Image (cartoon, coloured by chain):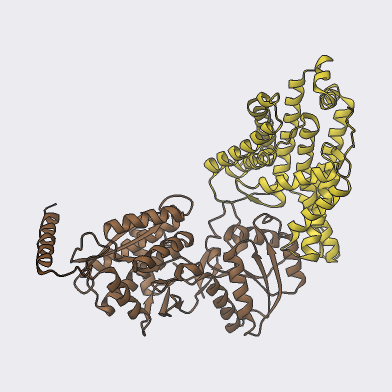
Amino acid sequence: MSFVQYLISGLSLGSVYALIALGYTMVYGIAKMLNFAHGDVIMIGAFTTYTVCSTMGLPTAAGVLAAAVLCTLLGVCIEKVAYKPLRKAASPLAVLITAIGVSYLLQNIALLIFGTNTKAFASVVSLDAIKLADGQITFTGETIVTIIACIVIMAGLMLFIKKTKAGQAMLAVSEDKGAAQLMGINVNGTIALTFAIGSALAAIAGVLLCSSYPSLNPYTGSMPGIKAFVAAVFGGIGSIPGAFIGGILLGIIEIFAKAYISSQMADAIVFAILIVILLIRPTGLFGRNIQEKV
Amino acid sequence: MKKFKKFACVAMASAMVFAMAGCGSDGSGNGSGSADATSFKIGGTGPLTGGAAAYGQAVQNAAQLAVDEINANGGVNGYTLELNYQDDEHNAEKAVNAYNTLKDWGVQIVLGSVTSAPCIAVGDKTKDDNIFQLTPSGTAVDCTKFDNAFRVCFSDPAQGTVSAQYIGENNLATKVAIIYDSSDPYSSGIYENFAKEAENYSFEIVSAEAFTEDSKTDFSVQLQKTKDSGADMVFLPIYYSEAALILTQANGMGFSTTFFGVDGMDGILSGVDNFDASLAEGVMFLTPFASTSTETNIVNFVSAYEEKFGETPNQFAADAYDGVYIIKELIEKSGVKPTDDVSTICNGFKEAISNGYSFDGLTGKGITWSADGEPNKAPSVVIIKDGVYQQL
């Protein structure tokens, strides 16, 4: 019986990782850059909802909407100020380091505004938990909503990229920026749109992350951000279904490692498995193996 | 200035006398720039600003309160006490600088430091200078590793030992589960000593689950294992931020049991913004001091502190208040004078504190010290009832 409960816990944790990983993988897949500030945009999203709902007492929907709008603006803004000027830099490392800088900047701004005290985040999900087998197995409302949100967002993203003009433009930019520009695609606009969508996803991920694990402080986003990045690499970075499967698997592996091997060693085991998988499949589970033509 | 001139004259004169008589200096007056014959200089460092400022300010306020009381009641053996607190921002390097400032001022007895890391750094210096050091609240083992250092509070491992004793002696539980932070020496130190001491009692440890700094938001597995182990009490040697999350998640999965914490649990009611404090009902924890106690000395202290500083004193304040009174009694017992050099005072205190000395204060009755600097006192436990701490 506890096996089933652990599986559910794993799904719950995994769906949060998957949701964050979708944002990571989307930005990487199209802009070809690792946005290490993604985890901190999540934190800003959660703080926005906390401020709107718990401090100002407005309804949940307003809080989630405010988070999505603010994070979208923030994402576009970060891209314009910090990443775009460096896109032509000689080394792709420059923009990577800037992303780390932005990450610390966001954390410290949150520290200044909200202080170090941890805040208990009030869940935005009002769905009741489903209890099975005499209450021995609990499916919390947050888990159900997160999994559904994940599937809907994944499907939506795939449709968007396949069926819309903007989506096709993104695909073109990801293949070859120069050629895309020659075809009359607004490369900068497309990348900005990518960041806007990625950051809106981050806001939703932040709200659901903190609903499931209701502890909010300026460092809330950083560790889930790193784990989600691992999940994205695990599934094959750039691949949208890969991020979903990678996130879910990572969550389940982590919970099972904690439950059946050792709660102290869980993280070490998770990362060891990652190394093994990358040794066998260097591009991740769903990654495409593109051969460079010389 | 006038005083200094006079002092300088005397010093010059005596130096000339010594020189003419061909005597060597005996090094008296070492470490105190201006030996003021009428008062003892007590100094300490603590975080008066920064993230841990609440602790440092509480210690400074309460120590000042105690010093003012003692001076108003005629002082100690006819001498008064002087207090000087310097800010260390809970930083070991700044603490050493702050200690040097205190030495320039002529500190004779150190009541500090407030937090562990600065306390260890200052401890290395007081050892070299042989100044008596009494930390009100430095809980790390190394805070008292030298023989000139003592503490008022329990050390980290001692909290584990006395928690096990308390649970065992009062038959609070038969099956105890533990959830601790394996990446934090404070938490794992308490856990190890708790487990060791538990062997002497009839209760059984049915599970011990860990979490780390990097994964301290999801406790579903630890709680599920705890629930499956059939524990009737969960021991949480962790800080209140994580404890609040554990209480919330346990409630979410319909797991109700008794939680028992240590001093890190202090703050659970107000330390986490927006936390549903009703979840903390029935939580017990080890604390040296409960401001809601009805004992006369505590009631008097709490009302005096509230009147002067406008807030309820915490355990750090109580530790510091006791610390000043311990120093007062040690002065009386050892008979040292402000004109003695710091080594004489230190040796006098060391002799006095470990030879049958016992102290009654806010944080315990009949407290005695062993030569290794650790206090022996009965643990005091509070339970949260109707949103306030109540002494058990």
**Picture quadrant where residue B20 is located:** bottom left
| Front one among B373 and A219 | B373
Position of B306 with respect to A278 (left or right) is left
Height in image: A197 above or below B144? above
**Picture quadrant where residue A232 is located:** top right
| Front one among A67 and B281 | A67
Position of A156 with respect to B373 (left or right) is right
Residue pushed farthest front? B22
- Residue A2 visible in this rendered orientation of the protein: yes
- Residue B172 visible in this rendered orientation of the protein: no
* Residue B369 rendering spot, x and y as whole percentages: 42, 79
| Front one among B215 and A215 | B215
* Residue A233 rendering spot, x and y as whole percentages: 80, 43
Height in image: B67 above or below B162? above
Position of B304 with respect to A215 (left or right) is left
* Residue A141 rendering spot, x and y as whole percentages: 78, 51
Query: At 30% from the left edge and 77% from the top edge, which residue is drawn?
Result: B348
From the rendered image, report the letter of the chain displayed in brown.
B
Query: At 45% from the left edge and 77% from the top edge, which residue is drawn?
Result: B372
Query: At 44% from the left edge and 54% from the top edge, which residue is drawn?
Result: B93
- Chain A palette colour: yellow
